[in-house]
Amino acid sequence: MLNKQKGFSLWLAVSMGSIAGIAVVLLAVWLSPIKSFTIGPQIEPSIEYGRRLIRETAALMGPGHEDPEMRFSGTYMDCASCHLDAGARPGTLSLLQATSRYPRFSGRDGNERDLRDRVNGCMTRSMNGTELSRDSTEMRSIVMYINNLNAQYAVMGQSKREPNEPPAFVEPDRGADISAGQIVYQQRCEVCHGSDGQGLAAATAKSEGYLFPPLWGFDSFNNGAGMTRILTAARFIKARMPLGQEDLTDDEAYDVAAFVNSHERSQRANLELDYPDLTKKRIDSPYPPYADDFPIEQHRLGPFKPIREYYENLSKL
Ligand code: HEC
Ligand code: HEC
């Protein structure tokens, strides 16, 4: 009898314990951030997963991902740090029409590239990361999402297609002035991107990405990225920055782009192999070699008119 009672209370204690245990587990699951439910390996490609990969790149495939196999990006930036509204907004660096532009010849690669190659171009340069395999769920989802944007664009009314942006950047006929750019930076950019250009990480954790992405240093785009070209950067900055108050003059956008790109950032290997035909190289490509004798400083800062004229004359020969 005594034994039975002991047995019963033991059973009671154990089962109470396990109920409490289950409750603790349930509570922990319930309290843990929503993302831990959705981050797990995604098997089926989908438009929605593609959209999230572009908007939440850091969380879904950043360098802090708990699964080392998922650490494709080399920075905690998101694709949407540059492709605003995950590429859904018309105008500068919009992805609405990307599908219809590929496949096409790439001077940088020296042959025809499709949309997947182009995505990997941004993965390895803008995101300083590694290529996604062409058939991975991630690549297929990104492509599905971009194709879907293209389909949306096809049925958009003309008024919705119009970018809501200042007039396009017009390149000043002079070299850019880095110290003038520093003043613009201090007055118009520093408040968000920081005096050290390192931006501001999301409040929760860096692995969730940035509130304000870094403009230079080792967690920003690398030195092979399109954004390191002063004309590309100035076009973007004039159209999209300062976020919410896009009113820079051409001169300010040009100088601040020079200032941003005067800083150190991650180095991409083998950049000298880009543009196998050097006469096709972008005139503002900041890294050698070139098919001309203009100094590297002029390719970085301008003035670009003489360089442009040189190549125009070459093509007339
Ligand atoms: C640092 C800014 C930056 C980030 C971050 C970035 N991109 Fe880009 N992306 C660019 C620029 C600049 C271009 C245009 C390059 C040019 O003019 O040569 C571009 C072009 C593209 C294009 C081609 C668009 C077209 O219409 O031709 C695609 C597709 C693209 N990016 C996808 C991505 C994806 C996917 C990611 C994230 C994995 C990403 N990008 C991250 C700056 C960025
Ligand atoms: C009000 C805050 C704010 C200000 C001010 C601001 N930015 Fe940004 N910037 C952002 C945000 C946020 C993003 C990422 C885009 C997004 O999340 O929508 C961004 C993205 C960028 C990017 C592309 C991503 C990267 O990290 O390289 C560049 C380049 C940039 N800003 C340059 C500038 C420059 C230059 C100025 C000053 C002329 C400036 N920004 C002022 C908030 C700001």
Image (cartoon, rainbow, N blue to C red):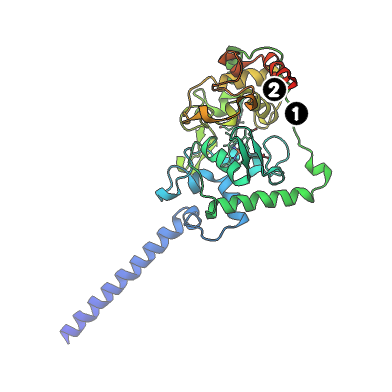
Secondary structure category for the residue under label 1: loop
| Quadrant of the rendering where the C terminus is positioned | top right
Residue 18 place in picture, x, y as percent: 32, 70
- Mark 2 C-beta to ligand 2 under 8 Å: yes
Identify residue type, mark 2.
Answer: Leu
Going from the N terminus, do you reach mark 2 or mark 1 first? Answer: 1
Compared with 97, 310 (above or below) is above
Secondary structure category for the residue under label 2: loop
Compared with 233, 4 (above or below) is below
Q: Quadrant of residue 286?
A: top right
Residue 250 place in picture, x, y as percent: 71, 20
Residue closer to the observer: 265 or 190: 265
Return the residue at label 2.
248
Q: Quadrant of residue 49?
A: bottom right
Residue 187 appears in the figure: no
Alpha carbon separation for disc pair 2 and 1: 9 Å
Residue 30 place in picture, x, y as percent: 45, 59
Identify residue type, mark 1.
Answer: Pro
Left or right: 21, with 257 as reference point: left
Residue closer to the observer: 209 or 110: 110
Return the residue at label 1.
166
Residue 240 appears in the figure: yes
- Residue at 51 percent across and 60 percent down: it is 43
- Residue at 69 percent across and 39 percent down: it is 94
Residue 241 place in picture, x, y as percent: 65, 29
Left or right: 36, with 55 as reference point: left
| Quadrant of the rendering where the N terminus is positioned | bottom left
Residue closer to the observer: 283 or 166: 283
